[in-house]
Amino acid sequence: MKKRTGFDTMSPYLYPFYICMHPRDGFLELKANKKGSSLVVTIIIALWLLVEMFHRTSTGFDMNTFNAEDTSLLRTSVITVMIFFMVAISNWCFCTLLDGKGKLKDICVVCANALVPYIIVRFITVCGSWVLAGDEQVFLTYAVVVSEIWGAFIAFSGLEEIHEYSFAKTLLAILLTVVGLIIILFLALMLLMLFQQVYFFVASLYFELSYQ
């Protein structure tokens, strides 16, 4: 039995910061106390969306590679939310087949907490892009890469804990999640193309009838 921390009395809004520093213990405590909060998940997703918009619109000129289309709030919202839930659903589907113990809500909690390092570092690097120039900006890129690696470790640790998997089985589950994500994206693209064809057919039929 692992030694208890003050996690059980901690505010739910502070859980993500504790988990960032102690991923394995944090998720173990989170699961034991059953205090995964849907509100906290929603807040983290909203912050991810906001920091992505901040990144696209406010990054220093030398590092800003986005065009006007990438700054659409609606487009960015749809992409970020879809990616988040497609990853969670894909993992839930495969881990259910692999006797995973985690529920869809638990997976969403893990995915959300894994985003926290990226959100913090991305905000800092955007601010840093205003004052750093030239070769110094490469450190900002390194910082983002480190945050992504740390986020991946948090996600791996969380999935390992909530599903009660071994290292190898967690790795397999993640690989299958990626495969599932590709399948979901392919099906979504096919459905989009189908809806477009139906729309164009109905629109052309409407115009033909209108002219007649």
Image (spheres, grey):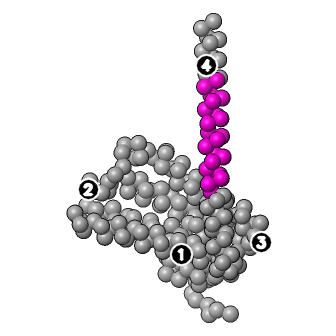
Which residue is outermost to the top? 212
The foreground one among 80 and 148 is: 148
Q: Residue at x 24, y 68 (%)?
A: 136
74 relative to 12, above or below: above
Mark 4 Cα shell of 10 Å, populated few (<14), some (14-19), many (≥20):
few
Q: Main secondary structure of the magenta part?
A: helix
Q: Amino acid at mark 3?
A: Asp
Q: If you read the primary sequence from the N terminus, does the residue marked by circle 1 or circle 4 appear first?
A: 1
Q: Please report the residue visible at 48 percent of the width from the left and 60 percent of the height from the top.
A: 48
Q: Is residue 68 left or right of residue 45?
A: left
Write down the residue under mark 3.
99
**Based on the displayed image, in which of its 4 quarters is residue 210 positioned?**
top right
Image coordinates for residue 90, horizontal then vertical, percent: 67, 60
Q: Amino acid at mark 1?
A: Phe
Q: Is 193 part of what is drawn in magenta?
A: yes
Q: Quadrant of residue 36?
A: bottom right
Task: Please give the residue where the numbered disc 1 appears in the rendered image.
Answer: 153
Tell which circle, 1 or 3, labels the residue nearer the N-terminal end.
3
Marks 2/1: CA distance?
31 Å
Q: CA distance from mark 2 to mark 4?
A: 46 Å
Q: Which residue is mark 4?
A: 204
Could you tell me how far apart the alpha carbons at marks 2 and 3 are, in whole angstroms? 49 Å
Range covered by the magenta-colored residues: 181-201
Q: Residue 13's mark?
A: none
* Local crowd size for mark 3, using a 10 Å CA cut-off: few (<14), some (14–19), many (≥20): few
Instruction: Identify which residue is drawn at 66% across, 78% down.
Output: 168
Q: Quadrant of residue 83?
A: bottom right
- N-terminal of the pair, mark 3 or mark 4, is 3
Quadrant for the N terminus, please: bottom right
Chain-order first, disc 2 or disc 3? 2
Numbered label attached to residue 62: 2
